[in-house]
Image: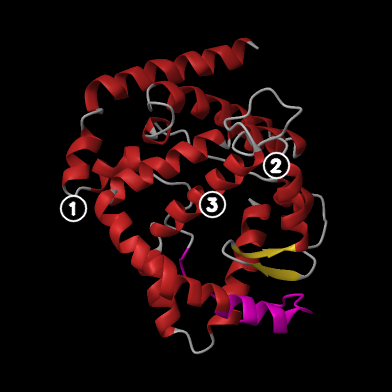
Amino acid sequence: MQSLMKKITHLFFLGFLFWTSSVAVPVSAANDVNATDEDAFDAFSDDGFDDEFGDFPTEHSVNDPLEGYNRWMTNFNDALYDYVLDPVFDGYDVIFPEPVRVSINNFFNNLYYPVSLVNNLLQLKFDHALDETGRFIVNSTFGFAGLFDPARAIGVEPHKEDLGQTLGYYGVGSGPYIVLPFFGPTNLRDFSGDLLDFYVNPIYYVEIREYNVVQNTYQGWGLVTYKEFNRFSLYEEEYRQIRSEAIDFYPLMRNAYEQNRDKLISE
């Protein structure tokens, strides 16, 4: 307990120094999205932003008995992007510049803390659970309710975990690959884990819980949909590039998803 309090106190002190000395940095970065100084974007850092659309492997053994449906749903999601989301993103990106959208994403990542904490503890990763607690405290205070990420700037990296990763950590197979409308790739293990994570994640409405962010189920799903919409707006260019360069887009996305999940489970 003394070690925990010492680390949290240390995080508070470093967070205070960071806030008092450089909180103005994100403001200047927001006025110049193409700034060349990468440090200017530290406080806008997004978990997994650089890795989400990285190098995509083309060969990976995937359990895909629903390939016919999955291909159809992938095409449906593509059409949804082309005819609905892309035009909406054009206006959304003007109203909310990239640094603002990254801050919104950071806010939702900060709210994810209970899920990460529970799953780090279930995997007996106590040091990661401690880091996640420190990040939540610092980012919720000096990061203005999680809009900024000063914890990363002072060297406390995120250890985001979900129940799908916990199940994989204990040897549960991925099960069939599934493509969901709008939300995209998943598999049976991860989808089942998400359903259980709902009871811990505060942005979903759970009637028996006291710490809901929203007041009813419809508000909860609306907030989740907006979270994913905002998150995808950060990956538009990568998505367009990958799709334009792919000979067969479907297996590329499928293999990338499964290998990325395998990587997260092994970390």
Q: Nearer the viewer, residue 70 or 89?
A: 89
**Marks 3 and 2 in Cβ contact (< 8 Å):** no
Q: Sequence order check: which comes first, mark 1 or mark 2?
A: 1
Between the C-alphas of marks 3 and 2, the distance is: 14 Å
Between discs 3 and 2, the one toward the N terminus: 2
Q: Work out whether mark 1 precedes mark 3 in sequence or the reverse, and give the earlier one.
A: 1
Tell me the chief SS of the magenta region: loop
Q: Is residue 172 visible?
A: yes
Pointer 1 with pointer 2, Cβ within 8 A:
no
**SS of the residue at dot 1?**
loop
Q: Is there a contact, CB below 8 Å, between mark 1 and mark 3?
A: no
Three-letter code, disc 3: Thr
Q: CA distance from mark 1 to mark 3?
A: 32 Å
Find the residue positioned furthest to the bottom.
247
Q: Is residue 63 above or below residue 202?
A: below
Q: In x, y percent, where is residue 211?
A: 64, 24
Question: Farthest top residue?
Answer: 2
| Circle nearer the viewer, 3 or 2 | 3
User: Picture coordinates of residue 129 (x, y %)?
Assistant: 63, 31
Q: Residues within 10 Å of mark 1 (few under 14, many from 20)?
A: few
Mark carried by residue 225: 3
Q: Which residue is mark 2?
A: 198
In the rendered image, which quarter is residue 91 located in? bottom left
**Span colored in magenta:** 53-75
Residue 36, disc: 1
Q: How is the image coloured?
A: secondary structure
- Is 73 placed above or below 267 here? below
Residue 213: % across, % down? 57, 30
